[in-house]
Image (cartoon, rainbow, N blue to C red):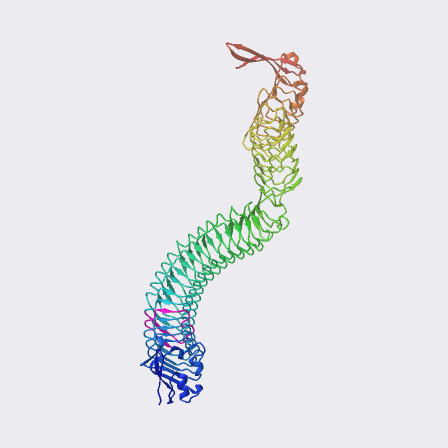
C-alpha cells in the first residue's frame, strides 16, 4: 500500500486511492496517475493526514464526483481535515456512485454538496455545525443521521430524503425552508433548542411526534404542510403567529395551543380533520381558510378574537361560537359548519357572502349590530329558529333559501335580494321600511301565510311564485302593473290590502275575505275613469284623495266600507257607481268634490262620518234613503247649492249645516221602523214623506218638530199603538196627506198643527178610539170635514172668531166652537179659551145651542 504526501504553500495531506501504492507529489489526480489508475475505476478516497485543499474537491472547472464518476466512498479521517473545515458546494452533486462519507472534523457542508446523491447511505460527521442549501436533497438512501453539534440546517437540506428514518440534531437552533420536505419515513424528531423553523420545513414528511423548544419564535409558512401522520399535542408558548398553511392537511393533529399567538395564518389548519381542540386565548386574527374542514373541531377558545377572514372556519365542526370582541367577519367564514348550533357576534356589522351557508344545525344567531347579510348568508340552515338581526337593512341573494325559520325579526330591513327566502319555512314577512324585493324572493315558500310589502318597496312580480299558502297579504309596493296581475292567483286569500295603483289583480279570495284598497304614494294618472279592484271590501282612508282627473268612479259590489277622506278634493268627480253592499262611508269622504251635483247612497249604508259632503259647492240633491240612524252636524257644511236631502225614517239626530231653503225629506221605502216607543222626528226635517213611519206599531208617542211643513200620504198609517202626536208650535205644517193617521186605532185625542191649511182624504180613517180633534183656525173645517173624519164620531174643537162664521158640515153630530182671548194681568200673559157655543143636531137636522162652559189655561 502506498501513501502520497503533498506539500502545498499552505497545506499538505496524505491520501489513499483504492488500494494502490504509487508516488505522487502534487494532487489527488496526480496520485491516481502515479497509481496507474484510470479515474473511472477510483472507488475510494481516504484523506489520512493533513489538510485537504477545498479546490481538490471543487473548483471552477470541475468537482471530485465529475473527476471520479464511480467513487463510492470518501473519508477524511481523524488526523486530517478539509481546508476551512467546509465541505465545498456541489462536490458530489448528482453523483450516482457515492455511498459512504465520513469526515471527522467539519463545520459546514456547502450548498448542493450531496444534491441528488441517490445512493448515499451513510454520512458521518459528529462535529458538523451547519448544513447548506440543498446539501443532501434527493439523498433517497439515507436512513439514519446523527449531528450532535449541528446548529443550522439551511433550506432544502434534507428535502426528498425519502427513506430518512432518524436524525439526531439535539442542538439545532435553525431549520430553513423545506429542510425535511418529503422525508416520508421520518416519524419522530427532538428539537429542544430550535427557535426557528422555516417555510414548509416538514412538508409532506412522515413526522408523527415532534418535541419543540418552548422558545420557538418562528414557525414558517407550511411548516407541517400535509404531515398527515402528525398526531402529537403541540403547544407554542413563545410563538406570536402561526403562518399560512402551517398545518394544512395534518389529518391526525388533535390538539394545538399557543397562549401568545395573536394571528393564525391562511389555511393554517386547512383540512385538519382530526383536530379536536385549539386554544388561543390571545388570538386577534384568523386568516383565510385557517380552520377549513376541521370536521371534529368542537372546542376552541378565542376570547380576544377581532377578525375572521374568508372561509375561516369553513367546514369545521365547531358547535358554539361566541365573541364579544369580533368586529370583522369574512365571507364563508362558517360555511358548511354542520355542527354549529349557536353564534353570538354582537359587534359584527356585516355578514359576508355565504357566512353561514349550509350550517344545517344552526339554531340561534345574535348579530344585532350587523347591517347587511350578503348572498347565501344563511342558505340551507335547516334548523334556524331564532335570529337577532335588529340592525340589518340588506339581505342578499339566496340569503335565507331553504331555511326553517318561521318568523324573522329584522325591523329595519330595506332590501331583499333575489331568491332570498326561496323554499324557506317562513310563515310571516312584515317589514315597514322595505324598499326593494328581488326576483323569486319567496319562490315556493309554501308555508308563507302573511306578507306585508309597504308602499316604499319596489317589488319584482316573480317574488311570490309558488307561495300557495298565502292568506294575509298587504301589498302596497311598486311593481310592473303589466306583469303582476297573477302574482296572488295561486293563494286562497282571507285578507288582502293593496293601493289604487293596482286594480287588475287576479285574486283568489275566500268567501269572507277582506280586501282593502288604500292610497298609492306614487302619483299615477288614471284618466277620467277609475274602476276599483274586483273583490275589494274596503276603500281605505284617502284612497283617491286629490286625484283631479277622475270623473267617474266604479265601486264593485263587494265593497262595504269607504274610509275617511277617501275621495276628498277629487275636483272633477261627477258620478259614482256604488257597491250594492256598502254599509259605511267615512268622514269627509266627498269633501271638496266641487263638481259633484247629485249623489244617492245605496240602501245598505248604515253609517256615515262627519263632514261627508262638506265643500261640495255644486251639490244640489242627496238621497240618503238607507239604513242610517244618525248624521253628524257638519255632513253638509258649505254646500250652498243644496236643494233637497232625502233621509230615512230611521234617522233620529239633527244636523244644522244645510241652507235654510233646503228641503229635508224623511222617507221609509223599506218599511223599517225606528226603535223604541217614542219618536222625535229629527229637528232638521222639513217633509215627512209618504209611508215614512207606516205600520210602526212600536210607536206610542210622536213629536214633530218646527221645521216640518208637510206630512205625506200614510206617513203614520197603521201605527196602531200610537196614543199621542204632538206638533211643535208654531208649526210650519201646511199639508197633511192622504190617510196620514189612518188606522191609528189607539189614538184618542189629537191637536192639529196651528198653521194647517190643507189635508188629504181619510186622514183619520179607521181611528176607532179617536174622541176629540182640535182643528186650527187656518183649516176650513167645513171644506175638509169629510176628508178628516170619514169613519169615526170624534168630537171636534174648532178655533174660530165667531160661531156664526163657521159652516157646519152636513154629517157633523157635535161641535164645540171656541174663541180665544189673550190678556195680561200684572205682566202675566193669560190665555182664556171660551166655549162660545156648543151645538148639537136634532132629529130635524137642526143645531140647538147647549149650555156654556168656561175653561182657563195659563
Quadrant of the image containing the N terminus: bottom left
Q: Which of 172 and 456 is in front in this view?
A: 172
Above or below 126: residue 703: above
In screen coordinates, is 666 left or right of 376? right
Asked whether residue 178 is drawn in magenta, I would say yes
Asked whether residue 513 is drawn in magenta, I would say no
Res 397 seen here: yes
Q: Nearer the viewer, residue 538 or 100?
A: 100
Q: Please, which residue is most extreme toward the top here?
A: 826
Above or below 664: residue 210: below
Q: Which of 730 and 437 is in front in this view?
A: 437
Dividing the picture into quadrants, the one containing residue 672 is top right
Residue 455 in the image: state x and y as whole percent: 56, 45
Dividing the picture into quadrants, the one containing residue 298 is bottom left
**Residue span colored magenta:** 164-192
Residue 758 in the image: state x and y as whole percent: 66, 21
Q: Please, which residue is most extreme toward the left here?
A: 79
Q: Nearer the viewer, residue 209 or 246?
A: 246
Above or below 113: residue 297: above
In screen coordinates, is 63 left or right of 578? left
Q: What count of labels does the image hold? A: 0
Residue 84 in the image: state x and y as whole percent: 35, 75
Res 96 seen here: no
State whether the magenta stretch is mostly helix, strand or loop. loop
Residue 360 in the image: state x and y as whole percent: 47, 61
Amino acid at each position: 500500500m502506498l501513501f502520497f504526501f503533498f506539500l502545498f504553500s499552505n497545506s499538505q495531506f496524505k491520501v489513499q486511492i483504492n488500494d494502490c501504492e504509487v508516488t505522487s507529489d502534487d494532487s489527488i489526480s496526480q496520485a491516481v496517475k502515479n497509481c496507474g489508475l484510470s479515474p473511472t475505476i477510483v472507488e475510494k478516497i481516504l484523506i489520512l493526514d493533513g489538510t485537504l485543499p477545498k479546490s481538490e474537491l471543487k473548483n471552477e472547472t470541475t468537482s471530485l464526483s465529475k473527476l471520479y464518476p464511480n467513487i463510492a466512498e470518501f473519508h477524511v479521517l481523524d488526523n486530517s481535515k478539509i481546508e476551512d473545515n467546509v465541505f465545498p458546494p456541489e462536490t458530489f452533486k448528482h453523483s450516482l456512485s457515492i455511498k459512504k462519507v465520513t469526515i471527522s472534523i467539519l463545520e459546514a457542508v456547502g450548498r448542493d454538496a450531496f444534491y441528488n446523491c441517490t445512493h448515499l447511505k451513510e454520512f458521518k460527521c459528529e462535529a458538523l455545525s451547519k448544513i447548506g442549501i440543498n446539501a443532501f436533497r434527493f439523498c433517497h438512501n439515507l436512513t439514519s443521521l446523527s449531528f450532535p453539534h449541528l446548529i443550522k440546517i439551511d433550506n432544502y437540506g434534507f428535502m426528498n430524503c425519502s427513506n430518512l428514518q432518524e436524525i439526531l440534531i439535539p442542538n439545532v437552533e435553525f431549520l430553513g425552508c423545506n429542510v425535511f420536505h418529503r422525508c416520508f419515513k421520518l416519524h419522530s424528531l427532538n428539537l429542544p433548542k430550535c427557535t426557528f423553523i422555516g417555510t414548509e420545513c416538514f412538508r409532506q414528511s412522515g413526522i408523527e411526534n415532534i418535541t419543540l423548544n418552548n422558545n420557538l419564535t418562528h414557525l414558517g409558512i407550511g411548516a407541517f404542510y400535509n404531515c398527515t401522520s402528525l398526531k402529537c399535542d403541540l403547544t407554542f408558548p413563545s410563538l406570536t403567529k402561526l403562518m399560512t398553511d402551517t398545518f394544512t392537511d395534518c389529518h391526525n393533529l388533535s390538539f394545538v395551543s399557543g397562549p401568545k399567538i395573536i394571528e393564525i395564518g391562511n389555511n393554517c389548519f386547512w383540512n385538519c380533520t382530526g383536530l379536536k381542540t385549539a386554544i388561543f386565548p390571545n388570538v386577534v386574527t384568523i386568516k383565510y381558510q385557517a380552520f377549513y374542514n376541521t370536521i371534529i373541531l368542537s372546542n376552541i377558545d378565542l376570547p380576544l378574537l377581532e377578525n375572521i377572514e374568508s372561509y375561516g372556519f369553513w367546514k369545521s365542526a365547531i358547535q358554539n361560537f361566541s365573541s364579544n370582541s369580533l368586529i370583522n367577519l369574512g365571507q364563508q367564514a362558517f360555511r358548511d359548519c354542520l355542527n354549529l348550533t349557536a353564534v353570538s357576534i354582537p359587534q359584527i356589522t356585516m355578514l359576508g357572502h355565504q357566512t353561514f351557508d349550509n350550517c344545517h344545525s344552526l339554531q340561534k344567531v345574535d348579530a344585532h349590530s350587523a347591517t347587511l347579510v350578503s348572498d347565501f348568508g344563511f342558505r340551507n340552515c335547516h334548523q334556524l329558529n331564532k335570529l337577532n338581526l335588529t340592525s340589518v337593512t340588506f339581505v342578499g341573494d339566496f340569503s335565507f333559501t331553504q331555511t326553517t325559520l318561521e318568523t324573522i325579526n329584522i325591523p329595519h330591513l330595506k332590501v331583499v335580494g333575489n331568491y332570498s327566502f326561496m323554499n324557506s319555512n317562513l310563515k310571516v314577512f312584515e317589514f315597514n321600511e322595505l324598499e326593494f324585493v328581488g326576483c323569486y324572493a319567496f319562490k315556493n315558500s309554501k308555508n308563507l301565510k302573511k306578507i306585508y310589502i309597504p308602499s316604499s318597496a319596489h317589488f319584482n312580480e316573480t317574488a311570490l311564485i309558488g307561495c300557495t299558502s298565502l292568506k294575509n297579504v298587504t301589498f302596497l309596493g311598486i311593481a310592473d302593473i303589466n306583469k303582476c296581475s297573477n302574482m296572488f292567483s295561486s293563494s286562497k286569500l282571507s285578507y288582502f290590502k293593496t293601493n289604487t295603483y293596482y286594480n287588475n289583480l287576479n285574486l283568489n279570495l275566500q268567501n269572507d275575505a277582506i280586501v282593502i284598497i288604500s292610497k298609492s304614494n306614487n302619483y299615477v294618472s288614471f284618466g277620467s275613469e277609475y274602476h276599483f279592484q274586483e273583490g275589494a271590501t274596503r276603500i281605505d282612508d284617502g284612497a283617491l284623495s286629490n286625484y283631479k282627473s277622475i270623473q267617474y268612479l266604479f265601486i264593485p259590489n263587494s265593497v262595504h266600507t269607504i274610509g275617511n277622506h277617501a275621495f276628498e278634493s277629487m275636483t272633477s268627480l261627477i258620478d259614482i257607481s256604488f257597491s250594492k253592499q256598502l254599509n259605511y262611508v267615512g268622514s269627509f269622504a266627498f269633501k271638496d268634490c266641487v263638481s259633484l251635483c247629485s249623489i244617492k247612497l245605496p240602501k245598505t249604508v248604515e253609517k256615515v262620518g262627519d263632514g261627508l259632503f262638506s265643500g261640495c259647492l255644486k251639490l244640489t240633491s242627496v238621497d240618503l234613503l238607507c239604513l242610517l240612524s244618525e248624521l253628524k252636524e257638519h255632513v253638509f257644511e258649505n254646500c250652498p247649492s243644496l236643494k233637497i236631502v232625502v233621509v230615512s225614517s230611521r234617522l233620529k239626530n239633527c244636523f244644522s249645516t244645510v241652507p235654510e231653503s233646503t228641503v229635508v225629506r224623511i222617507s221609509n221605502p223599506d218599511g223599517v221602523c225606528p226603535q223604541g216607543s217614542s219618536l222625535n222626528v229629527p229637528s232638521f226635517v222639513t217633509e215627512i214623506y209618504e209611508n215614512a213611519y207606516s205600520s210602526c206599531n212600536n210607536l206610542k208617542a210622536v213629536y214633530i218638530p218646527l221645521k216640518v211643513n208637510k206630512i205625506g200620504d200614510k206617513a203614520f198609517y197603521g201605527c196602531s199603538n200610537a196614543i199621542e202626536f204632538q206638533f211643535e208650535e208654531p208649526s210650519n205644517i201646511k199639508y197633511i196627506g192622504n190617510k196620514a193617521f189612518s188606522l191609528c186605532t189607539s189614538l184618542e185625542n189629537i191637536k192639529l198643527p196651528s198653521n194647517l191649511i190643507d189635508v188629504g182624504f181619510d186622514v183619520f180613517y179607521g181611528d176607532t178610539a179617536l174622541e176629540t180633534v182640535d182643528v186650527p183656525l187656518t183649516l176650513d173645517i167645513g171644506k175638509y170635514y169629510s176628508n178628516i173624519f170619514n169613519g169615526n164620531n170624534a168630537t171636534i174643537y174648532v178655533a174660530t172668531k165667531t160661531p156664526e162664521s163657521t159652516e157646519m158640515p152636513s154629517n157633523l153630530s157635535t161641535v164645540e166652537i171656541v174663541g180665544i182671548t189673550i190678556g195680561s194681568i200684572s205682566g202675566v200673559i193669560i190665555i182664556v179659551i171660551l166655549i162660545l157655543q156648543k151645538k148639537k143636531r136634532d132629529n130635524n137636522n137642526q143645531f140647538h145651542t147647549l149650555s156654556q162652559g168656561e175653561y182657563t189655561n195659563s
